[in-house]
Image (cartoon, helix red, strand yellow):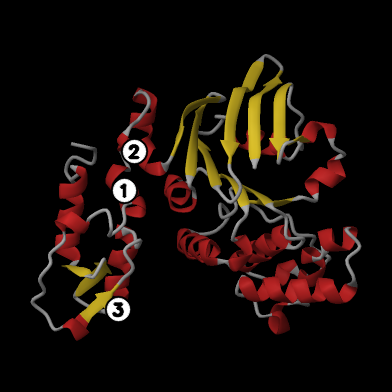
């Protein structure tokens, strides 16, 4: 658990972070978003004490980390940055093994951990373990950076624009793969990103910052449906329907979906009720099926692309022409 209490940082006469307070429960992901200069990266760096706060406290699992030795505190946190920060003259294995080596793990244990993580991030050890960073693509380097952050199995992972250096297609694919990684299960994560869709897709809670102050802290749905002020409403206005598709699930649309089907059951794609609208549309297109179904409590509901979009409009009061809540 991470608790930030009245955190403040000034650079000369400029207050970069102004009395910030929030709490991230164990196993949750919090995304810090906001425009450039809003204080999100400065906040993340203070959590890891790459920057020392002028005021406030950083409490991790009940302990004030400002009272702990830096090396002890940092080894309990994984840290992923935009440009990976891999050591160019270290192999992939050596890069991933940095923290376990500092912790004096046995060599066999380190090798086993490295191979497990490489497999988890989709880089077969036999192919990639002995390569150097300049022999890898940008996406592959990013995966090695993720594996390195997880090497010592830290309970907390800090991520600063972790996919920002990747092209949009690779970025989307890798972040969705990251969400499925067993190695991230149960981790407490603080994510800084300028990509609002990324924040909505990955985070349980979102903290929207402006000029170093919190404008709203809540779930993605709360920020969309119940904006705390005009700034919040304006911030999301241009992406309203697109963001809704990343967070609304088929279960949310259950009352608006049909209980009858005109096609043979064998031609229908079965999906879990927690599938998002965006994921459901992608699954239909990828499968070549014309319709999908969900089931709960012994009942079924059916949909195709047109009825799915219509159900979303009816459920949320949002439409393509309006782009905002009706």
Residue drawn at x 59%, y 61% is: 185
Placement of the N terminus among the 4 image quadrants = top right
Report crowding for label 3: few under 14, some 14 to 19, many 20 or more residues within 10 A (C-alpha): few
Residue drawn at x 44%, y 53% is: 201
**Residue 39 seen anywhere in this rendered image of the structure:** no
The residue nearer to you, when weighing 8 against 23, is 23
The kind of secondary structure element at disc 3 is helix
Q: Which residue is mark 3?
A: 287
Does the CB distance between marks 2 and 3 fall below 8 Å? Answer: no
Q: Which residue is mark 1?
A: 244
Q: Position of residue 289 (x, y in %)?
A: 23, 78
Q: Position of residue 112 (x, y in %)?
A: 78, 76
The kind of secondary structure element at disc 1 is helix
Q: Is residue 6 above or below residue 93?
A: above
Q: Is residue 274 above or below residue 320?
A: below
The residue nearer to you, when weighing 289 against 62, is 62
Does the CB distance between marks 1 and 3 fall below 8 Å? Answer: no
Q: Position of residue 235 (x, y in %)?
A: 38, 33
**Residue 181 seen anywhere in this rendered image of the structure:** yes
Q: Residue furthest top?
A: 13
Going from N to C along the chain, the mark reached first, 1 or 3, is: 1
Q: Quadrant of residue 137?
A: bottom right
Q: Which residue is mark 2?
A: 224
Report crowding for label 1: few under 14, some 14 to 19, many 20 or more residues within 10 A (C-alpha): many
Query: Would residue 125 appear left or right of 301 to someone viewing this image?
Result: right
Placement of the C terminus among the 4 image quadrants = top left
Label 1, label 3: how far apart the Cα atoms are: 23 Å
């Amino acid at each position: 658990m991470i608790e930030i209490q009245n955190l403040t940082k000034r650079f000369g006469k400029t207050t970069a972070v102004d009395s910030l307070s929030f709490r991230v429960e164990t196993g949750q992901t919090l995304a810090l978003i906001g425009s450039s200069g809003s204080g999100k990266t400065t906040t993340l760096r203070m959590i890891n004490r790459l920057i020392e706060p002028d005021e406030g406290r950083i409490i991790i699992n009940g302990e004030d980390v400002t009272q702990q030795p830096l090396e002890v505190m940092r080894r309990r946190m994984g840290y992923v940055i935009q440009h990976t920060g891999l050591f160019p003259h270290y192999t992939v294995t050596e890069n991933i093994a940095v923290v376990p080596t500092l912790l004096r793990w046995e060599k066999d244990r380190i090798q086993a951990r490295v191979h497990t993580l490489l497999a988890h991030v989709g880089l077969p050890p036999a192919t990639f373990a002995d390569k150097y960073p300049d022999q890898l693509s940008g996406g592959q380097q990013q995966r090695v950076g993720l594996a390195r952050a997880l090497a010592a199995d830290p309970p907390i992972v800090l991520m600063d624009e972790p996919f920002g250096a990747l092209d949009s297609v690779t970025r989307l694919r890798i972040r969705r793969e990251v969400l499925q990684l067993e190695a991230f299960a149960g981790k407490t994560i603080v994510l800084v990103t300028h990509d609002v869709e990324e924040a909505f897709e990955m985070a349980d809670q979102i903290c929207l910052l402006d000029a170093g102050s919190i404008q709203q802290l809540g779930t993605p749905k709360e920020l969309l449906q119940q904006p705390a002020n005009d700034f919040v409403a304006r911030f999301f206005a241009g992406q309203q329907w697109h963001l809704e598709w990343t967070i609304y699930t088929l279960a949310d649309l259950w009352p608006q979906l049909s209980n009858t089907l005109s096609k043979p059951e064998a031609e229908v794609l079965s999906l879990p009720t927690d599938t998002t609208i965006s994921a459901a549309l992608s699954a239909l297109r990828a499968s070549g099926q014309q319709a999908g179904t969900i089931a709960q409590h012994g009942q079924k509901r059916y949909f195709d692309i047109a009825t799915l979009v219509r159900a979303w409009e009816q459920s949320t009061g949002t439409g393509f022409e309006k782009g905002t809540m009706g």
